[in-house]
Amino acid sequence: MEIQKAWYRISIKALIYNDKWDFLLVKENNWLWDIPGWWLDHWENYDSCLKRELYEEMWLKVISINKTPKYFITAHKPESKTRPWLANIFYEVKVEDFDFKPSNECIEIGFFNVNTVKNITTIINVKEFVKLLKNNT
């Protein structure tokens, strides 16, 4: 059996809570739910990446980002031939409001917790994130 070379492209993710401590997920144009954020471009830091992505995807304005990452996860996506390994760094983010506007990348947003997230179809990194949350409680 050939061992596949592992390489990761880092994705910066926004951990946004509502007043009930449910976390925000976005429904992408492929109809799968994901944690907001995206790939870190070579010239960016986490701060500029999150601000850019949240505005591009949802028209949300960031008002604060915790400078210390909250979580780090990796996930294997074997069906992908070009990006089989995901690496996500989570930062807690506060936005000005939740006046969401759909985009080509994000068609819906919603708040979920470890119990309600099982009722939707997510990508693999969300499943790994939920496992991490369950293990930390």
Image: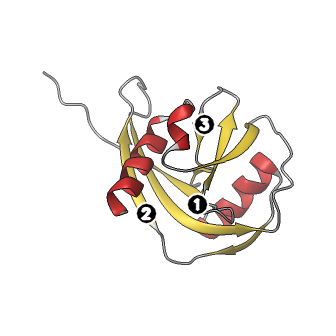
The residue carrying pointer 1 sits among few (fewer than 14), some (14 to 19) or many (20 or more) residues within 10 Å by Cα, namely many
What residue do we see at 61% from left, 63% from top? 44
Residue 79 as seen in the image, left or right of residue 31:
left
Picture coordinates of residue 27 (x, y %)? 67, 36
Closer-to-camera residue (58/51): 58
Disc sitting over residue 71 in the figure: 2
Picture coordinates of residue 42 (x, y %)? 56, 57
Residue type, label 3: Trp
Q: Secondary structure at mark 3?
A: strand
Closer-to-camera residue (102/42): 102
Looking at the image, which residue sits at the far bottom? 67
Residue type, label 1: Leu
Q: Quadrant of the C terminus?
A: bottom left
Q: Are marks 3 and 1 in contact (CB under 8 Å)?
A: no
| Sequence-first disc among 1 and 2 | 1
C-alpha separation, residue under disc 3 versus residue under disc 1 = 14 Å
Residue 55 in view of the camera: yes
Task: Give the residue at mark 1.
Answer: 15
Above or below for 77 versus 129: above
Task: Give the residue at mark 3.
Answer: 33
Picture coordinates of residue 132 (x, y %)? 37, 54
Residue type, label 2: Tyr
